[in-house]
Each structure stands twice: as C-alpha cells, then as structure tokens.
Image (tube, rainbow, N blue to C red):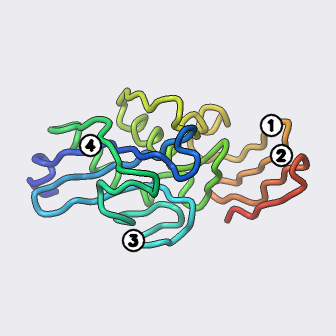
Amino acid sequence: MSNTKTSCEVQLRAAKIPFIGWLAVHYWFAIIEPEQTTRWEIWQTRNTGGKSWGHLHKNLMPFDRGVGNGASWLVTTWTGETAKNLTDLLENSPDIYPHNYCYRYVPGPNSNTYVRWILEQANLRCALGRKAIGQSYMHFAGQESGQRFGIHLGLGHQNILEKYCTITSCPLLNSAILNN
C-alpha cells in the first residue's frame, strides 16, 4: 500500500438526475490523490465508459461533472485514516459489492444503494437526503450480502439471485424488463 493513500481525500458528491432532479439525486465517490483523481459510481447502463464491472464504473466521467441536470456539489469530505479505509473499500468494490450486475431505478439497487453500502461497510454515518432513491434498498429487501430473496411489492414480483438480476415484471404496467 502506498504512502499517498494516507494523504488522499475522499469526496461524496451529488447531482440532480436529468428530468427528475426535483425528485431524485445521483451520488458517487471521488478519491482525490496527489497523482490522480478517480470517480466511483453505479451507472444505469453497463460498461458505458471508463473501467467497468457491469454497472459499477471507475472514471466514467470527470470526478466533479454532473450527470446532465446541472453541476455537481460536494456533500462531504473524508481525510486521514477514514479516507484510506474508504479508498480501500472503493478499490475492492468490483469484487465485494453484491450488485455490480444489477440496476433498477426503483426500489434499487442503484447508484445510491452502492453509496449507502460503501458507507455502511466503512461504519460511517452520512445523511444522503430524501432524494437518494435506492439508498435503503439493502435494508428494505432484507439483503445484506447478496443472498437469494423474493419480495412482493404490490406492483409485481422481483427475484434476485445473488448478484445477478433476472426479470422484473410489473402487471400494472404490463411489462417485463430484463436487468442483466
């Protein structure tokens, strides 16, 4: 492990989502090191750019760029040992985050699920705000480590097997979406 990790900072950033910014906000992490800056986030489309592992992307965009509805803003910053621990978690998240290959706008998992999961793994408390749709997905679904589950939401039935999604069906909308 390099000594530069002890001098890094980790930022939590956010931006309004296009068209529904009044309702939803996208959160991500940026690691600011002397020699480089990296952005870590879940994106709705797999393998869109930068380096990716399904929906998990590293450097999809510049670290401070919004997502299409205005500028991003800084939510909070961590330094010292906390930043080092967050950096290690983020860099290992391609191997340990249980939903790299699954994305749903509602109820999740999505970008805000990822941010909440990283914060919980680091034992950090940080309010994301009411517009962080998907942040409670892991608790709502009773899923802490990617185990199999099925839940009835009244709108349809969703099945997730480990970190892969199968079909989400919604009789109310008479549609099915393949999420993998």
Of the numbered discs 3 and 4, the one sitting upstream in the chain is 3
Seen in the image, is 86 located left or right of residue 35? right
The three-letter amino acid code for the residue at tag 2 is His
**Quadrant in the picture for the N terminus:** bottom left
Q: CA distance from mark 1 to mark 4?
A: 36 Å
Nearer to us: label 3 or label 4: 3
Identify the disc placed on residue 51.
3
The three-letter amino acid code for the residue at tag 1 is Leu
The three-letter amino acid code for the residue at tag 3 is Lys
Query: Pointer 3: residues within 10 angstroms few (<14), some, or many (20+)?
Result: few
The residue that disc 4 covers is 85
Residue shown at 59%/38% (left/top)? 138
Q: Label 1, secondary structure: give it.
A: loop
The three-letter amino acid code for the residue at tag 4 is Asn
Q: CA distance from mark 1 to mark 2?
A: 6 Å
Q: CA distance from mark 1 to mark 3?
A: 34 Å
Of the numbered discs 1 and 4, the one sitting upstream in the chain is 4
Residue 92, can we see it? no
Seen in the image, is 68 located left or right of residue 90? right
Residue shown at 29%/41% (left/top)? 74
Point out residue 41 in the picture as x, y percentages from the top left corner.
42, 55
The residue that disc 2 covers is 157
